[in-house]
Amino acid sequence: MAVSLYMESCLQKLVSYFDKAETRIKNQNIYNRLTAIGQPFVASDLRIAAKGLHKLKLSGLLDCSKLLCDAGSADGRIVALATSCFGIPSLGIEYDPRLVNVARQNIGRLQAMGIIRKVPASIIQGNFCRDHTYRNVHFQEIATFYCFESNSYCLANKIIKESPKGTLFVYCSQNSTTNFEGLKKLMTLSLESDSKKSYYIHALMKTHRGPFVPLQH
Ligand SMILES: C[S@@+](CC[C@H](N)C(=O)[O-])C[C@H]1O[C@@H](n2cnc3c(N)ncnc32)[C@H](O)[C@@H]1O
């Protein structure tokens, strides 16, 4: 699945930026460690994420005019990708204060370099499962949630209970299966990174109105 020339050039700038950013902060021991919430920070492969979002856009599942949230945004690379290459207004929510600072610096630098242009991009510090994290941005306004191997069941439950019908949950994992009862799985993309690792991007949607009530057996 090829991405467009514009996308390829945008992606190259981001990959090069984040490679350098990783090197710059390597001595701070931020990458490949447990974050403040006790979860490992392993960054998304930007090329895999771009291919996945591109395919979801072509399939009509991803609405680029509506707000995307990267749940567990770490160094901000998905917010950077979504805003700069897809023009999607985006926010990241991250629990770890050190990563929040890193992500805000990254977004600021990419804006100053003109790589992120005129599209809203922000990073919130907090727990994406908690109501008070959404004080300034309403949870219901978020049309697409992106989540890469974070503790996503609480988020899926919150979407099932509170989000409007049509909300998209994009879950990326090295696992080919998912089990989010109450969200409808629409598509699973199987993608391989340059280093031959397999990743799966699952697109799930809230397809019912109101909270999901499981059938009684
Ligand atoms: C595997 S990393 C993914 C980073 C980023 N989304 C990406 O794709 O490059 C998961 C991140 O989610 C954060 N995280 C996990 N659970 C969280 C929660 N409940 N609220 C906020 N951040 C969380 C971790 O601190 C970590 O930085």
Image (spheres, rainbow, N blue to C red):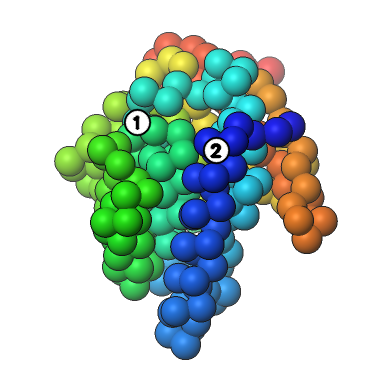
Q: Is residue 60 above or below residue 161?
A: above
> Mark 1, residues whose alpha carbon is within 10 Å: few (<14), some, or many (≥20)?
some
Q: Secondary structure at mark 2?
A: helix
Please indicate, yes or no, whether residue 83 appears anywhere in the rendered image. Answer: yes
* Tags 2 and 1 touching, CB below 8 Å: no
Residue 19: quarter of image: bottom right
> Which-is-in-front pick, marks 2 and 1?
2
- Give the mark nearer the N terminus: 2 vs 1: 2
Q: Residue furthest bottom?
A: 27
- The residue that appears at 42% across and 25% down in the rendered structure is 64
Q: What residue do we see at 17% from left, 41% from top?
A: 136
Q: Which residue is mark 2?
A: 7
- The reply to whether residue 184 is visible in this rendering is no
Q: Is residue 109 above or below residue 163?
A: below
Residue extending farthest to the top is 209
Q: Position of residue 59 (x, y in %)?
A: 62, 18
10 Å neighbourhood of mark 2: few (<14), some, or many (≥20)?
A: some
Q: Position of residue 196 (x, y in %)?
A: 82, 56
Residue positioned most to the left: 136
Q: Which residue is mark 1?
A: 67
Foreground residue among 210 and 166 = 166
Q: Quadrant of residue 142?
A: top left
Amino acid type shown at disc 2: Met
Q: Measured from the top left, where is residue 138 in percent x and y?
A: 24, 33
Q: Foreground: 27 or 95?
A: 27
Amino acid under disc 1: Leu
Q: Taking 190 as reference, is 81 left or right? A: left
